[in-house]
Image (spheres, helix red, strand yellow):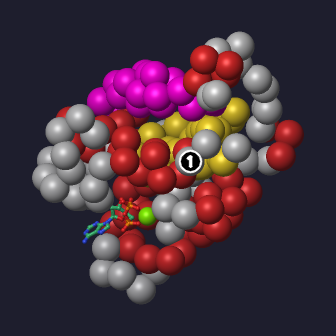
Amino acid sequence: MERTFIMVKPDGVQRNLIGEVIQRFENKGFTLVGLKMLKPSRELAEKHYAVHKERPFFKTLVDFITSDPVVAMVWEGDGAIASARKIIGATNPLNAEPGTIRGDYGVSIGRNLIHGSDAPETAQQEIGLWFEPTELVGWTPTAQAWLYE
Ligand code: DAT
Ligand code: MG
């Protein structure tokens, strides 16, 4: 089973889309193993987006992500990392397909609602950055037998 880090960004929280995001991952068949709301520190946000630190949008991105609460989550399932990226849609919501979260709810790259890890290495890194091991709860949903053969 794979785990991925998903975050509803401040715009998603303000627009009352926390439930919608959770619903889509639940509906897909992934398992929620970590969940918390927090207003990220600048240090945490800069670490999270470290790969983008030389990009021109880095400061506004960190300003935005630290401006208000976010909801950080870890979701588990076979192929969860790549599948979550598909559920989320393209980085620019105007290019994101209808049916994806960004495609259905966004119009601007700087307000694209949600983050999802892009690879196994970044997923592991991001989960470790945002969650203590004790905050992650492994469990077996009873529906598992109907999701996996
Ligand atoms: P993603 O969030 O789809 O993984 P990314 O890792 O390339 O996209 O970029 C991280 C975030 O930075 C993205 O969600 C929104 C912001 N961003 C990316 N490219 C941008 C750009 N050209 N202008 C403004 N913000 C941008
Ligand atoms: Mg990214």
Displayed quadrant of residue 39: top right
Disc 1, SS: loop
- The structure residue drawn at horizontal position 37% and vertical position 56%, both measured from the top left corner, is 64
Q: Circle 1 is placed at which residue position? A: 79
Instruction: Please determine whether, in this image, residue 50 is positioned above or below residue 96.
Output: below
Taking 103 as reference, is 40 left or right? right
Q: Which residues are magenta?
A: 14-32
Q: Is residue 6 visible?
A: yes
Tell me the quadrant of the picture where the N terminus can be found.
top right
Q: Residues within 10 Å of mark 1 (few under 14, many from 20)?
A: some
Q: What is the number of callouts on the image? A: 1
Q: State the residue at coordinates (46%, 28%).
A: 28
**Quadrant of ligand 1 in image:** bottom left
Q: Position of residue 70 (x, y in %)?
A: 49, 41
**Vertical side of 108 occupied by 51: above or below:** below
| Coordinates of residue 35 in the picture (x, y in percent) | 64, 33
Q: Does residue 21 show up magenta in the picture?
A: yes
Label 1 is placed on what type of residue? Gly
Q: Is residue 83 above or below residue 27?
A: below
Residue in view at x 46 percent, y 46 percent: 83
Asked if residue 96 lies left or right of residue 80, the reply is left
Between residue 68 and residue 80, name the one nearer to us. Answer: 80
Q: From this viewpoint, which residue is outermost toward the front?
A: 149
Q: Main secondary structure of the magenta part?
A: helix
Q: Residue furthest top?
A: 142
Is 114 on the left-hand or right-hand side of 132?
A: left
Task: Give residue 78's position: percent from left, percent from top.
Answer: 61, 42
Image x and y of residue 55, in percent: 36, 82
Q: Describe residue 21's horizontal placement relative to residue 130 as left or right.
A: left
